[in-house]
Amino acid sequence: MGEYSAADEPLDGTGMRIAVIAARFNDHITKPLLAGALDTLHEHGVTGDVPVFWVPGAFEIPLVAKRLASSGVYDAVVCLGAVIRGDTPHFDYVAGECASGISHVALSTEVPCVFGVLTTDDLDQALARSGGAEGNKGCEAARTAIEMVALLQRLPSPARQGD
């Protein structure tokens, strides 16, 4: 098979079915992340309606990601949210469980579930990463989804049990 990186080719999402999950909590951050993700998907050939599923917060993202990834309808799921550190350990529980849950869904379904959830120390960092000085992590998450779908399409399918 040789060496392959989807990053060596132009991003082409033509024919890909990608869904987006966005958390309503901190929507002043997630709305720009969503706009960046949708613009990037369309810019790279993902046509038609890209469904967006809103959830209350980042903690709820993995459950919806599991349902979407398990449906057989989508090639990838982009997960967007913002968890900003506060004065309590709430940040650690939400951010950690969200990341772990999204990773578990991707591994168990073999559908890329891209972690586009900002985990920042303060609001300024979140603003910088949602279209400010640090770019837009929603755009990056969308590019990652396209690249991962393209890469998985080139890899051999998993062996079936009992063969």
Image (cartoon, rainbow, N blue to C red):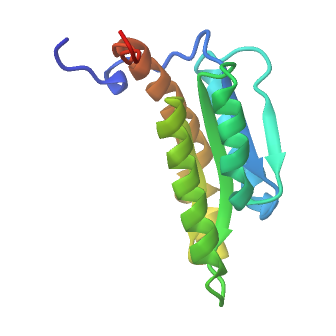
Residue at the spot x=58%, y=63% of the render? 97
In this view, the residue farthest toward the front is: 162
Front residue of 112 and 140: 112
Residue at the spot x=70%, y=24% of the render? 71
In this view, the residue farthest toward the left is: 2
Q: Position of residue 93 (x, y in %)?
A: 60, 73
Residue 75: which quarter of the image? top right
Left or right of 140, for residue 36: right
Q: Quadrant of the N terminus?
A: top left
Count the labels in the image.
0
Front residue of 29 and 113: 113
Front residue of 10 and 105: 105
Up the image or down, 110 lies above or below 81; here it is above
Residue at the spot x=56%, y=17% of the render? 13
Residue 90: which quarter of the image? bottom right
Q: Position of residue 111 (x, y in %)?
A: 54, 29
Residue at the spot x=59%, y=40% of the render? 139
Residue 4: which quarter of the image? top left
Up the image or down, 90 lies above or below 144; here it is below
Up the image or down, 101 lies above or below 16; here it is below
Q: Quadrant of the C terminus?
A: top left
Left or right of 138, for residue 34: right
In this view, the residue farthest toward the bottom is: 87
Q: Position of residue 16 (x, y in %)?
A: 61, 16
Q: Is residue 44 visible?
A: yes
Q: Position of residue 79 (x, y in %)?
A: 64, 45
Q: Is residue 124 visible?
A: no
